[in-house]
Each structure stands twice: as C-alpha cells, then as structure tokens.
Image (cartoon, helix red, strand yellow):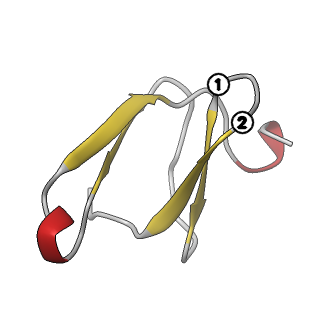
C-alpha cells in the first residue's frame, strides 16, 4: 500500500483516530496501521501502530 499522509490523535479512552489528508480506499477492521515520519529527521521513524477497529462513520 502507498503511504498516506494524515494526523493522529489519541482519544480519552486510549484509542487513536487517524484523519487522512486525502481519501483512502479499502481501510477495514482487522488490518494493521503503522505510523511513521515522512520528512526531515523523522523520515522513516516508526512512531507506533495498531489494529484498525473501524473506519469512517463506524468511529463517530
């Protein structure tokens, strides 16, 4: 899959919400998400990851 730019934010319950800059196709529960830097000193650095539990209207 081609990397997609976006922002991550942690919810009060510890879950993470990802907001992509552009629409991303075929995101589905059970898939893995990995968060890493794109540019400068953070390029290629892994910041975290997890299992996708929902997308779009599923996450409220």
Please name the residue that numbered disc 1 is placed on. 14
Q: Residue furthest front?
A: 41
Residue at 37%, 34% (x, y): give it. 49
Secondary structure of residue under mark 2? loop
Screen quadrant of the C terminus = top right
* Residue corresponding to mark 2: 11
Please rate how many residues cluster around mark 1, counting C-alpha atoms within 10 Å: few if below 14, some from 14 to 19, many from 20: few
Image quadrant holding the N terminus, namely bottom left
Which residue is more in the foreground, 42 or 26? Answer: 42
Q: Position of residue 47 (x, y in %)?
A: 30, 43
Q: Is residue 19 toward the left or the right of residue 35 in the image?
A: right
Q: Residue at x 78, y 39 (%)?
A: 59
Q: Which mark is residue 40?
A: none
2 or 42: which is nearer to us?
A: 42
Count every numbered label the image shows and give the total: 2
Q: Residue at x 49, y 66 (%)?
A: 6
Q: Is residue 38 above or below residue 34?
A: below
**Which residue appears at 76% of the width and 30% of the height?**
12
Kindly state the secondary structure of the residue where label 1 is placed.
Answer: loop
Q: Residue 22 placed where, x, y %? A: 55, 77
> Does residue 22 sit above or below 16 in this rendering?
below
> Residue 26 location, x and y as percent?
50, 50
Q: Are marks 1 and 2 in contact (CB under 8 Å)?
A: yes
18 to the left or right of 56: left
Picture quadrant of residue 28: top right
On screen, 60 above or below 13? below
Between the residue at mark 1 and the residue at mark 2, the CA separation in whole angstroms equals 5 Å
- How would you rate the neighbour count of disc 2 (Cα within 10 Å): few for under 14, some for 14-19, many for 20 or more? few
Q: Relative to residue 43, is residue 33 drawn left or right?
A: right
Which is more toward the observer, 22 or 41?
41
């Amino acid at each position: 899959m081609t990397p997609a730019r976006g922002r991550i934010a942690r919810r009060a319950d510890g879950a993470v919400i990802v907001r992509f800059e552009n629409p991303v196709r075929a995101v589905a529960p059970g898939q893995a998400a990995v968060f890493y830097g794109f540019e400068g000193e953070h390029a290629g650095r892994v910041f975290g990851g997890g299992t996708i539990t929902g997308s779009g209207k599923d996450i409220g």
